[in-house]
């Protein structure tokens, strides 16, 4: 993507790091996690990381008006939001969500989450307790 590449192994490892971090933050089956990113490699890493953690993603398009994004965040009850640092100025300033930047090593509260130090191993799927009845995503339509 735009002069960037990831092998399947690299994608899997980075998604596993996101998943392990999300699990450490309490993400489990049916937990909604916002995905506020441009189309990019980070989008794929974030999406797969959410699913590997057992959560469900809520895609939020940075091109949507701020009021629409705010409504979607409030309505869905998203508490963790994955994003990119260059979008930080467009995000709601209400402070209700923990914002984890996929392209830097701290979150919106200044905590060092250091995704790169998380395990690159797959999460044991038995520990997720998932079934076909659990959410994978929540989509808002216009």
Image (cartoon, grey):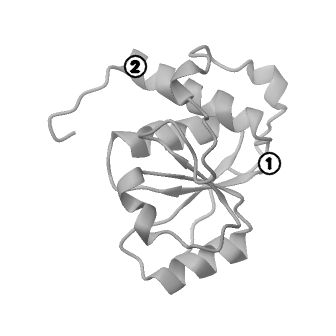
- Of the pair 89 and 11, the residue shown nearer to us: 89
Q: Residue at x 41, y 52 (%)?
A: 85
Looking at the figure, which quarter contains the N terminus?
Answer: top left
Residue for badge 1: 133
**Measured from the top left, where is residue 41 in percent x and y?**
34, 39
Residue 10 marker? 2
The residue tagged with tag 2: helix, strand or loop?
Answer: helix
**Looking at the image, is 73 positioned above or below residue 15?**
below
Mark 1 crowdedness (10 Å alpha carbons): few <14, some 14-19, many ≥20: few
Locate residue 97: give its quadrant.
Answer: bottom right
- In the rendered image, the residue lying farthest to the front is 110
Q: Earlier in the sequence, mark 2 or mark 1?
A: 2
Q: Is residue 111 left or right of residue 3?
A: right
Residue 126 shows in this picture: yes
Q: Is residue 75 left or right of residue 60?
A: right
Q: Is residue 25 left or right of residue 88?
A: right
**Measured from the top left, where is residue 116 in percent x and y?**
51, 23
- Of the pair 15 and 118, the residue shown nearer to us: 118
**Looking at the image, is 52 positioned above or below residue 67?**
above
Asked if the residues shown at circle 2 and circle 1 are in contact, with their CB atoms under 8 angstroms apart, the answer is no
**Measured from the top left, where is residue 109 in percent x and y?**
63, 52
- Of the pair 68 and 21, the residue shown nearer to us: 21
Residue 110 marker? none
**Looking at the image, is 130 positioned above or below residue 72?**
above
């Amino acid at each position: 993507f735009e002069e960037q590449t990831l092998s399947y192994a690299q994608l899997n490892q980075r998604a596993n790091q996101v998943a392990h971090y999300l699990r450490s933050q309490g993400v489990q089956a049916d937990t909604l996690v916002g995905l506020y990113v441009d189309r990019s490699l980070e989008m794929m890493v974030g999406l797969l990381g959410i699913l590997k953690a057992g959560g469900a993603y809520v895609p939020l398009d940075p091109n949507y008006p701020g009021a629409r994004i705010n409504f979607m965040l409030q309505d869905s009850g998203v508490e963790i939001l994955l994003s990119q640092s260059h979008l930080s100025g467009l995000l709601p300033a209400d402070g209700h969500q923990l914002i984890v930047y996929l392209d830097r090593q701290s979150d919106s509260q200044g905590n060092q989450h250091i995704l790169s130090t998380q395990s690159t191993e797959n999460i044991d799927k038995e520990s997720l307790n998932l079934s076909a009845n659990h959410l994978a995503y929540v989509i808002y339509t216009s």
